[in-house]
Image (cartoon, grey):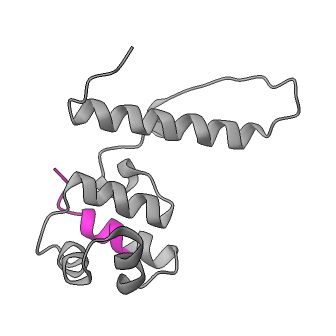
Amino acid sequence: MSSPHAGARIERAIEAAGLSQRALEKATGISQSTLSRIVSGARPAKMPEIAAIARAVGATVAELAGSGSVAARVQCAARATNGSDMQRMRETLLHYLELDAYLDDQAVPATV
């Protein structure tokens, strides 16, 4: 499911988060040897692995999988009357939209 360049994106995200593969292993439960194979491109990352890595390094699934950023496709406007931080509101909205896109990709039905 991941693109051929997901390993390089994952490696950059791990470095940007200041984590070692061993630290990421502890945070995700994905063995260091599997992480090494994913980063090197010897093994494609499965979507649940990408999701776990994204959560651990503070990235989105789309950023790591290379499926295109929802942020690049979405336009939003908001108004806060309670002094809320608009950037934080946008980031929260984008995380929910990324999750929605991921669930759509995985054919997980929406609940009502």
Corner quadrant of residue 10: bottom left
Q: In this view, does 100 lie to the left or right of 6?
A: right
Does 9 appear above or below 19?
above
Q: Which residue is drawn at 42% across and 82% down?
A: 23
**Residue 23 or 83: which is nearer the viewer?**
23
Does 25 appear above or below 54?
below
User: In this figure, what is the number of numbered marks?
Assistant: 0
Q: Farthest residue in the top direction?
A: 112
Provide the residue span drawn in magenta. 1-11
Is residue 70 on the magenta stretch?
no
Does 25 appear above or below 9?
below
Q: Farthest residue in the left direction?
A: 42
Residue 47, horizontal then vertical, whole percent = 24, 52
Residue 58, horizontal then vertical, whole percent = 51, 61
Q: Which residue is drawn at 34% across and 78% down?
A: 25
Q: Is residue 5 left or right of residue 100?
A: left
**Residue 43 or 69: which is nearer the viewer?**
43
**Residue 67 or 80: which is nearer the viewer?**
80
Does 64 appear above or below 103?
below
Corner quadrant of residue 54: bottom left
Q: Which residue is drawn at 26% across and 54% down?
A: 48
- The C terminus lies in quadrant: top left
Residue 49, horizontal then vertical, whole percent = 27, 60
Q: Which residue is drawn at 55% across and 26% down?
A: 75
Is residue 7 on the magenta stretch?
yes
Residue 91, horizontal then vertical, whole percent = 61, 42
